[in-house]
Image: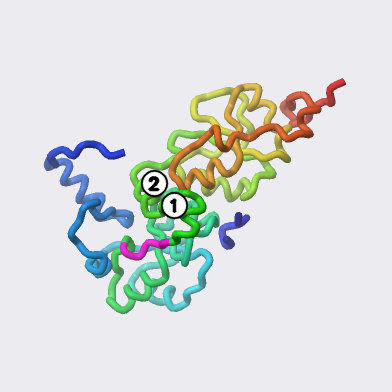
Amino acid sequence: MSQNSNEDTTKPQTPISSRSRKRQTFADSSPVAKSPRHSSTSPAAVGRQRVPGLAYKVLFTGVVDEGGEKVLAHLGGSMAKGIADMNCLVTDKVRRTVKFLCAVAKGVPIVTTDWLEKSGKAGSFLSPNAFVVKDPEQEKKFSFCLQDSLRTASSQPLLQGYDIHVTKSVKPEPVHMKDIISSSGASFLSKMPTSNKPQTVVISCEEDWLLCGPAVSASIPVVTAEFILTGILQQKLDFQLHKLSPPAAALHYSPAGGKGRGRRKT
């Protein structure tokens, strides 16, 4: 797992009202607009679709593409200042970097460098939906489909309404986890929660188990980082699978107090 941002179901169909048409038109104008599930439009035709008037703010992860950056600027796009204003990510494969996970969480297109190359040749930005990264090996490894996860995340953030605290030794570091958590719609808690409010979660690790005493006492779920990392890729939350169990050494201690220290049993 990279430690920083620079490294590595369906409801019955109902007739569409005029209001629905308006909503659909608005959705299709966004950078994460989705093609109909059943469409006669060929992939090639989708790739040729222009996206007029859309200002792309792009980040790269795991790849260096100077030519693509020039195309981006030439067509009126720009490099994003950070994850918060990114609306497209360029890479070559599934990478569990902070940027990649934030992009999935936000539901923004994650595309190959072909998007910029072919957009440059076309003289305008092509729809990124035809250039979404495909990585069968990694998608199988983590049991997810990138395109499906992006579609799901764009409709509703996975962690919307959650409050999440990350203990100090978790990897990626809390400062990077904050970006991932915020991109998923949750609020980042800087301090350990001590009362069990709905949708409050603590992400921790074995090294920080003693710090989790207040959360454990308040029956707040304490989970590993994979709760977020794998959860974002799969766009589902599994509290049981990613529950953090006390390390063997901690069995010799009583639950930690507010300062994170426990006393040896006698």
Most distant residue in the right direction: 266
Q: Residue at x 31, y 79 (%)?
A: 121
Q: Circle 2 sits on which residue?
A: 153
Residue 6's image quarter?
bottom right
In this rendering, the count of numbered labels is: 2
| Residue type, mark 2 in image | Ala
| Residue type, mark 1 in image | Val
Residue 52 appears in the picture as rendered: no
Q: Residue 245 or 20: which is nearer the viewer?
A: 245
- On the image, the x and y values in percent for residue 139 come to 46, 55
In the image, residue 31 above or below residue 9: below
- On the image, the x and y values in percent for residue 227 come to 54, 40
The answer to whether the residue labelled 1 contacts the one labelled 2, judged by CB atoms less than 8 Å apart, is yes
- On the image, the x and y values in percent for residue 221 come to 58, 29
Q: Residue at x 84, y 22 (%)?
A: 265
Q: Residue at x 61, y 40 (%)?
A: 224
Q: Circle 1 sits on which residue?
A: 104
Q: Give neighbour class at mark 1: few <14, some 14-19, many 20+ (Cα, 10 Å).
A: many
Q: CA distance from mark 1 to mark 2?
A: 7 Å
Q: Start and end of the magenta stretch?
A: 130-134
Task: Decide whether residue 132 is among the magenta residues.
Answer: yes
Quadrant position of the C terminus in the picture: top right
- On the image, the x and y values in percent for residue 192 come to 63, 32
Q: Secondary structure at mark 1?
A: helix
Left or right, 39 with reference to 228: left
Left or right, 30 with reference to 107: left
Q: Residue at x 45, y 46 (%)?
A: 234
Q: Give neighbour class at mark 2: few <14, some 14-19, many 20+ (Cα, 10 Å).
A: many
